[in-house]
Image (cartoon, rainbow, N blue to C red):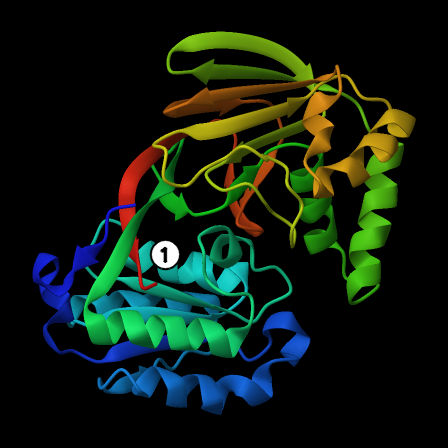
Amino acid sequence: MLAVTAADHPSAAGGPVAVLANPTAGRGRHLGLLPQVLERLAAAGRPVRMLEARSAVEAQAACHEAVAEGASGLVAVGGDGTVHLALQAVAGTSVPFGAVPAGTGNDFAVDTGFPADPLAAANVIAAAVRDGRSHPVDLARVTAADGTRRWYGAVLAAGFDAIVNERANRMRWPRGPRRYDLAILVELARLRPRRYTLRLDGETHEVDAVLVAVGNCPTYGGGMRICPAADPTDGLLDVVVGGRFDRRTLMRVKPRIYQGTHVEHPLVRSYRARTVEVAAEGITTYADGERAVDLPVTITVVPGAVRLLR
């Protein structure tokens, strides 16, 4: 993979390393490590600036401000949600990015080569900052029907998993993981294939499906290999479609997603494309586990859209 040096991105000239940390990521289990993470990042010889934010909106604004002010790097300490916020600011810019996995799901960080251990990841990032080294990887750019654009790094879900997430987010009871479990039960009872129109590099496919995922990376949901062959350096998106599953078949196949063997099921189809258009009625998509936009959407891979500090 191509390595980019400090001479290739002027932001590496000497600005601070900006750090976005989510203290609630992973239910706070890595919160005590944050001082050590910051200490290790400081070993790169650059000032380390913690970004202050009390909400996702403030966090994203703080990241954009740090990039605009010439940060030498942006580091997200948290899970996929924190990474997703930070990517909105660095995508398509010369500011390199580092991910310290500290969440419940760390799919983008692990899939793009950062160590799963937060302190080890901080060491890798610090070494890359010190050496002025970064590696470009692809991102996916989502465009909604109203022109809204958003980036994601790992996977966009537009099927059963997205529907479950939307159900869980609307529920006020119970709290914690049980809310998601209850949402699964509710949506399983309502399960039905939906008609999707997919356009893959201009070729139209009409499908009845239960699962639809568009991956830049292989995994989502904390290690589920929904798009097992996806490679964030190949300039392509992987599209995995699970067809007319009934409840019993879906529950039998779903555990196989952790190993990526679900793609061998006769009702599953896999495709690759640079541009993917997805349309269906009544579905809100989730990208990197975060609520994104309603279908229809156009998803385009942007090669080398972000430079990783590793």
* Residue 158 visible in the shown view: yes
Report the front residue among 4 and 148. 4
Residue 79 placement (x, y as % from top left): 54, 64
Residue 209 versus residue 25 in the image, above or below: above
User: 115 left or right of 202?
Assistant: right
User: 8 left or right of 275?
Assistant: left
Q: Say which residue appears at 22% left-offset and 84% top-offset.
A: 46
Assign the N terminus to one quadrant of the image.
top left
Q: Say which residue appears at 10% left-offset and 73% top-offset.
A: 13
Report the front residue among 169 and 261. 261
Residue 221 versus residue 124 in the image, above or below: above
Residue 203 versus residue 176 in the image, above or below: above
Residue type, mark 1 in image: Leu
Residue 93 placement (x, y as % from top left): 20, 54
User: 42 left or right of 95?
Assistant: right
Residue 141 versus residue 29 in the image, above or below: above
Mark 1, Cα crowd under 10 Å, few <14 / some 14-19 / many 20+, is many
| Residue 234 falls in image quadrant | top left
**Element on which disc 1 rests:** helix
Q: Say which residue appears at 55% left-offset and 66% top-offset.
A: 116
Assign the C terminus to one quadrant of the image.
bottom left
Report the front residue among 185 and 235. 235
Total marks shown come to 1
Residue 143 placement (x, y as % from top left): 37, 34
Q: Which residue is mark 1?
A: 87
| Residue 131 falls in image quadrant | bottom left
